[in-house]
Image (cartoon, helix red, strand yellow):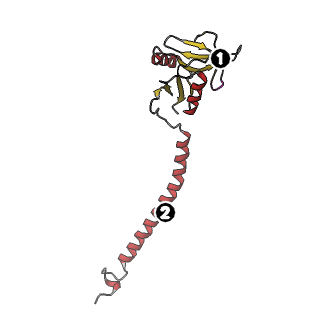
Amino acid sequence: MITPEWHDGRRDNWIHRTIFKLKKCWIIYLCMCIILLTLVIPVVVAVLSKCPQTMECSGKWIGVRKKCFYFSSDTKNWTASKRFCSSQGSELAHIDTEEDMEFLRRHTGTFMHWIGLNRKQGESWKWTNGTTCNPWFEISGNGSFAFLNADRVHSSRGFIDIKWICSKPKF
């Protein structure tokens, strides 16, 4: 008759001890993995949260370099256009580079579009975010609100209803 101590052919119960050792190793291995993950995951999350998140331009927005632009098909005065852009988490277009200017001029076609420049009587031109514009481009006219067409930037009193361009950063 075989007793439980003899079923693996050894008197010292080798199978039971080996299985117990393996279970013990797996538990230690599992604990080490959990500890490692609890240390690594927060570090990875912290590093990734500091990286700029890419936001693609959606719907009718057009992405160019680091910005998204929206060209309206509707018409409004300058103030209503500014309000529309704000409701979209953007501003009336800021033109920071010659490349932006060329892109916007090509896309305006024969239409006039409000952009984010305005000024009070006797003051400098300012962007809608409050920064002073250092005009590296000419703004023709004596108005207080700027618009762009395929030709150049002009100014108006802001009361006419024309199309507009919104802009926001991609990031």
Where is residue 64 drawn, in percent x and y? Answer: 47, 25
Residue extending furthest toward the left: 1
Residue type at the position of mark 2:
Cys
Q: In the image, 61: left or right of 78?
A: left
Q: Which residue is mark 1?
A: 125
Q: Nearer the viewer, mark 2 or mark 1?
A: 1
Instruction: Give the image quarter of residue 138.
Output: top right
Instruction: Specify the segment rendered in magenta.
Output: 128-133
For residue 136, say whether it is visible.
no
Residue 26: in sight, yes or no? Answer: yes
Q: How many marks?
A: 2
Q: Position of residue 131 (x, y in %)?
A: 65, 23
- In the rendered image, residue 131 lying in the magenta stretch gets the answer yes
Which residue is labeled 2 in the image?
Answer: 31
> Helix, strand, or loop for circle 1?
loop
The verdict on residue 75 being magenta is no
- Percent across and percent down for residue 148 are 53, 16
Which residue lies at the image location 57% right of the left edge and 33% below the top edge?
Answer: 87
Most foreground residue, 95 or 90: 90
Q: What's under tag 1, amino acid-wise?
A: Trp
Question: Which comes sooner in the sequence, label 2 or label 1?
Answer: 2
